[in-house]
Image (spheres, rainbow, N blue to C red):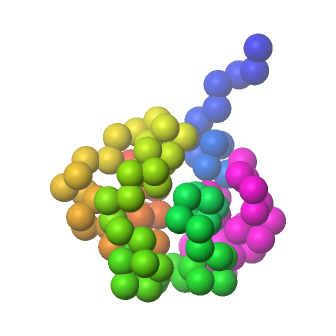
Amino acid sequence: MLPPQSPLQIASRGVRHGKKAATWAETGCPAELQPLGAYVAEVLIDQAGITLPEIESASRFAEDLRIDEGTIEIVMTLEEDLVLSIPDEDLHQLTTVSALVDYLYRRLQ
C-alpha cells in the first residue's frame, strides 16, 4: 500500500503536461507556488481545452481564457484532487489564474 499523499504532493505530481507546465510556473509564480501553479495550469488545459501559451498568471478566466468561473468540471477536479471544498462565495472572487493559485495555496497550508 502506498503512503497517503498530501494535497501539495498531488498538485506537484504532473498530470499530462508536466515539464511544460512546470516551466510555465517557473516564470509565472513565486517559488513556493510553482508546484501548485503547474498543477492549476494542467487542470485548465485538461478541463477547459486551452493551451499553455494562452495562460498567464494575470489571465482572467472569463475575459482572457473564456472560462466561466462556474465551470463545474474544473472546480470538481480541484476539490477532488486537493481534498478541499471551494465555497461559491470564494469562487466569485477568484477571477485570475494567480488569484486561484494563491487561494489554493493558502487553503492547503
Vertical arrangement, residue 54 with respect to residue 68, above or below: below
Residue at 55 percent of width and 58 percent of height: 47
Residue 70 is situated, as x and y percent measured from the top left of the image, at: 32, 59
Name, please, the residue furthest toward the right: 19
In the depicted view, which residue is nearer to us: 51 or 92? 51
Residue 96 visible in this rendered orientation of the protein: no
Name the residue nearer the viewer: 60 or 101.
Answer: 60
Residue 54 seen in the current view = yes
Q: Main secondary structure of the magenta part?
A: helix
State left or right for residue 73 relative to residue 43: left
Q: Measured along the vertical axis of the image, is residue 30 above or below residue 11?
A: below
Query: Quadrant of the rendered structure where residue 39 is?
Result: bottom right
- Residue 4 percent coordinates (x, y): 64, 25
List the single residue furthest toward the top: 1
Q: Residue at x 64, y 32 (%)?
A: 5
What segment is highlighted magenta in the picture? 13-39
Q: Is residue 78 magenta?
A: no
Q: Position of residue 77 (x, y in %)?
A: 50, 46
